Image: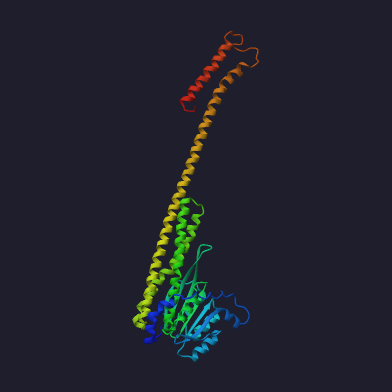
Amino acid sequence: MSERRPRPAAKKAMKSGWRRALTPAQPPEPPPPEPSEPAGTPEQAEAVSVVQAALYRDGVRVSSPATLAETFRELREQPSGMAWIGLARPTEDELLSLAAEFDLHPLSIEDALEAHQRPKLERYGDTLFVVLRAARYLDAPEEVDFGELHVFVGPDFVITVRHGAAPDLSAVRLRMEETPELLKLGPEAVLYAILDAVVDGYEPVVAGVQIDIDEIETEVFRGDPEVSRRIYELSREMVEFQRATRPLVGMLHGLMAGFSKYGTDEELQRYLRDVADHVTHTSERVDGFRQALTEILTVNATRVTQQQNAEMRALAEAGFEQNEEIKRISSWAAILFAPTLVGTIYGMNFQHMPELSWRFGYPFAIGLMGVICAGLYVIFKRRGWL
């Protein structure tokens, strides 16, 4: 980090204007459009990746170079200035040119090129390399979009490499430029302003997730069949959110541990502690969200099981009633079959049959039919079939 010391006037102005600078007095400028794939000449490709580059002296912008080469040249011509370079998905050649100009460590360049890094803080000599995971809540699809930001902070330069739409660093630059006394503090103030912007960006995400969880609870008790999928997707987003916020707590404490060694301004120290408090609060909220989603998923699984048991019980009851009906039908079929069997036997047209000429043959047959029917009725009645 830089060894510069702020002038007394800058300290006084910072005490009264730091929070004012970080609270937008007017709507921030819209973020620059996302860069498309580089095409055409190398100069055109570089212009696509370089979102914005500026040189500052005493907290005031003195020039806005269009390319990295111009930025390097003008910074050499102004030894007391500070360069703030913003890149979006830069090419390997651009990062290598930055490494050659500012003596950046190859490992940090490799991380910035590949992206997909976890938040971390590394110190390479006089240069700090910071990886941040920004987040924003998308209202239409009701999901969390994560972006990755790599920040190189040296004695006279700040380089930001953005992978994704978040965060909106143009708003951070605008706020800092509106309060020049803050920029006089050098690259450290820019780093802490970026940290604050990333952390402040978590608040709308926390609010959006809280609304989603409230809606999910309603859907669970309403029996929405799609709620399980929504719980699972939101749980995955909370895992990513934890990976973005948890490491920040340790990173900020690491920065605070170097206050005395690197002579960090006292007001910046207070500001960093405030950012650390916000990160800790956000991390605790995210942990609470994960716990709540786990409990909601358990409740939903219990309700699904209960519903399935109720359906199985209803099916069993329907099957039991069906069996009872079959028993009744079968019993009456058997009772009616007995006299039919007797009548069929005595109705056969054979010349020589027992009881064919018997005077009491007909009453006997009728009585036999009645006895058999009555006997079957009693048997089925005792067994509960009728």
Q: Which residue is outermost to the bottom? A: 77
Q: Can residue 91 be seen in this view?
A: no
Q: Residue at x 51, y 89 (%)?
A: 74
Residue 164: x percent and y percent?
Answer: 52, 72
Could you say which is closer to the camera, residue 125 or residue 200?
200
Q: Residue 130: horizontal and vertical position, in percent?
A: 44, 76
Q: How is the protein colored in the picture? A: rainbow
- Residue 377 versus residue 245: which sits nearer the camera? 245
**In x, y percent, where is residue 226?**
51, 54
Query: Is residue 217 in view?
Result: yes
Q: How many numbered markers are drawn?
A: 0
Q: Residue furthest front?
A: 25
Which residue sits furthest left?
260
Q: In this view, does 301 lie above or below 234?
A: above
Q: Position of residue 271 (x, y in %)?
A: 38, 76
Above or below 114: residue 206: above
Name the residue located 47 percent from the left edge and 28 percent from the top edge.
Answer: 384
Q: In which quarter of the image is the N terminus?
A: bottom left
